[in-house]
Amino acid sequence: MSNERNVNGADNKKEQLEQFTTDDRHKKMTTNQGLKVSEDEFSLKAGERGPTIMEDFHFREKMTHFDHERIPERIVHARGYAAHGEFQVYHSMKEYTKAGFLQDPDKTTPVFVRFSTVAGSKGSGELARDARGFATKFYTEEGNYDLVGNNIPVFFIQDAIKFPDLVHALKPEPHNEMPQAATAHDTFWDFVANNQESAHMVMWAMSDRAIPRSFRMMEGFGVHTFRFVNEEGKSHFVKFHWKPILGTHSVVWDEAQKLNGKDPDFHRRDLWEAIEAGDYPEYELGVQMIPEEDEFKFDFDILDPTKLWPEEDVPVQLIGKMTLNRNVDNVFAETEQVAFHPGHVVPGIDFTNDPLLQGRLFSYTDTQLIRLGGPNFHELPINRPVCPFHNNQRDGYGRQTINRGPVSYHNNSLAQNTPETSTEEEGGYKHYDEKVDGHKIRARSGSFKDHFSQATLFWNSMSKAEKEHMINAFSFELGKVENTSVREQVVEMFSHVSTELTHGFAKAIGVEPPKEKEITVTKSSPALSQENTAKRPETRKVAVIVGKGFNGAELQTVVNTLKREGIHAEILSNTLGTVKGSDGVELAVDQTFLTADSVLFDAVYAVTGSEEDKSFYKKAVLFVYEAFSHFKPIGATQEGQKLLEVDEMKHSPGVIIEDEPQEFANQFIDAIASHRFWNRKVL
Ligand code: HDD
């Protein structure tokens, strides 16, 4: 297709992609040359029982294509899932940036977002303890803008030259390729202890943030400090945030481990199903801004990617909203072939000298060359800008554009010196003309040397439950580290962050807690705790345990009320088919005790039925107990109350027992919105 099209609005990208989309159903089968195929089951042989012959071009074409179906997986972020959507700014950001897509609240910009884990291979379980990638491609009229972030606002290292070392340490160990998608092993923790700038991010990685409930319920961060530049050339330092409308929520570690077995696709299924159901995930775009002249007013270096800007000091302004509203048609063509790059910017957005960002600007194009097989990956449908693109670049593997005419150089006279460059006024990208003056030196700035203060800030900001989870996470991860010296080094390192923390896990990993260090940071940032996030019931999944002889009228009232709140109730019973209530009502069963598991749900509503036998109760009791032990809301009415075997459960927070159906439903919905009941005593 021509790249001359210049259509506007959120449908641009969809229309563009449709021109490359094909539906093979009800069509005649052909070879790739368009030749109709008469037989696709038997290769061409010399006799029915003889050898296959070379002449069989159909066999050769089919087999060759198959043999080449795979491309290298991403070196990091291999396991990912994506969706299409649109972005709209709330009000013009003209005062701060000239970026076209941030000017007009009536304009929608198409986006493509890929979420990912970092460490695991393409087929690994999605509930690994890990950072999550949150990469957004905005198809703007001024070219593609990529915000290639994570769900953690800081990074392990301060200089990109250490990235290969970090990744070698966190990937499976090379001698035995274990463990998959996990940092619970010697090389990772050896790297941590010997690269102490990692302290802050390790705190995040050991927190609940690293095991999100859903891609729809996690924040995103651009991590680096970027620049906004306005028409007048004035620059503001800026940090980007994505804030999910549903709030930031996590699962518990035991649940995460079980989920990886019960449904290793849990996060992608959640995203896919939400979009198919019309529960479109929404995120607000937030920015923190610091005027150029305030660069040195902070007690940390704002160019240091291991530091965040506490929201209480530099408030996040919400400037727009992104809605993901369309699943991909083909995962390989779109999700696998999408190529992100922090260097894909538009006028009004610029870089800073953050040494991690500077190195990323090299790495991303480089990796696409091997991954996507050459320099023409920008021509793949998912990567094409929606605005025209013209230059003198030519040829290379897989070239699709047919550039007309003899001229492919600049300057020229034969084509009147076109394609021509644009002035800044015409939209030509001009780098911010920051003055740079220095000696060539391989060094770290002294202002980057405080590795612990913000790690302590993070710890201070956690709720009691979050702290407990972190202590457990350190105990688990380091418990898998075989080398005693590495365990000791890590304990020593984190004793500079918090005595409470290190005393919490040192014993569990067989290390003597070190002498108490003097830690002076007392500050906390409430915005860092998930306790303070938005809590809403919409889109949550409830398992409704129903058995023969249930009370149909009551169940209907409750389920209808849940539905009105946007909660998804799935009927779970002993077998598929239908289950009959005492009043003759018949319900279709969605799941059985075999196909489902409590870890797949946010809450359990126990109803059962008067005619069920012991074996049903046994399975149902276990199901309810597991949800209870993961601090989930439990509702119990009718016979369902018998599933709360231990009396103490009945009086626990988040366990709703109530005879009046409407009142029960209301209380249960409030409990579902609360997500988890951390103050529950798990028996
Ligand atoms: Fe990176 C992929 C995020 C540091 C080199 N990175 C990648 C993806 C995300 C991030 C979300 C997946 C994109 C997708 O879905 O296709 N990376 C980050 C963040 C970082 C970061 C938030 C720190 C702030 N990355 C980083 C450094 C380097 C890289 C320092 C190297 C110098 N990252 C890559 C890469 C990848 C990548 C090797 C692998 C696949 C790809 O680029 O397209 O080039």
Image (cartoon, rainbow, N blue to C red):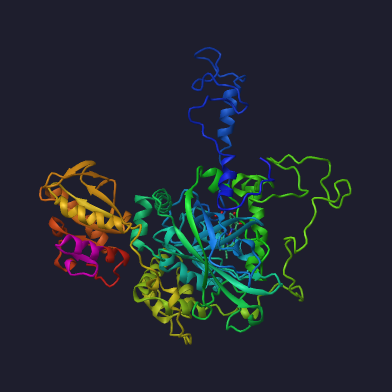
Q: Residue furthest front?
A: 106
**Left or right: 289, with 663 as reference point:** right
Q: Quadrant of the N terminus?
A: top right
Q: Quadrant of the C terminus?
A: bottom left
| Residue under the image location 69 percent in, 40 percent down | 400
**Left or right: 426, with 582 as reference point:** right
Residue 585's quadrant in the figure? Answer: top left
**Left or right: 212, with 23 as reference point:** left
The spot of residue 68 in percent (x, y) is 58, 37
Above or below — where is 260 with respect to 399?
A: below
The spot of residue 261 in percent (x, y) is 36, 51
The spot of residue 638 in percent (x, y) is 13, 57
Q: Is residue 88 magenta?
A: no
Q: Quadrant of ligand 1?
A: bottom right
Q: Which residues are magenta?
A: 650-668
Is residue 473 shown to the viewer in this render? yes
Q: Residue furthest top?
A: 47
Above or below — where is 354 with respect to 618?
A: below
Count of marks overlaid on the render? 0
**Left or right: 231, with 114 as reference point:** right
| Residue under the image location 51 percent in, 67 percent down | 190
Q: Is residue 662 magenta?
A: yes
Residue 660's quadrant in the figure? Answer: bottom left
Q: Nearer the viewer, residue 641 or 141?
A: 141
Q: Nearer the viewer, residue 680 or 171?
A: 680
Q: Nearer the viewer, residue 601 or 277?
A: 277
The spot of residue 162 in percent (x, y) is 61, 65
| Residue under the image location 56 percent in, 13 percent down | 46
Above or below — where is 404 with respect to 457?
A: above
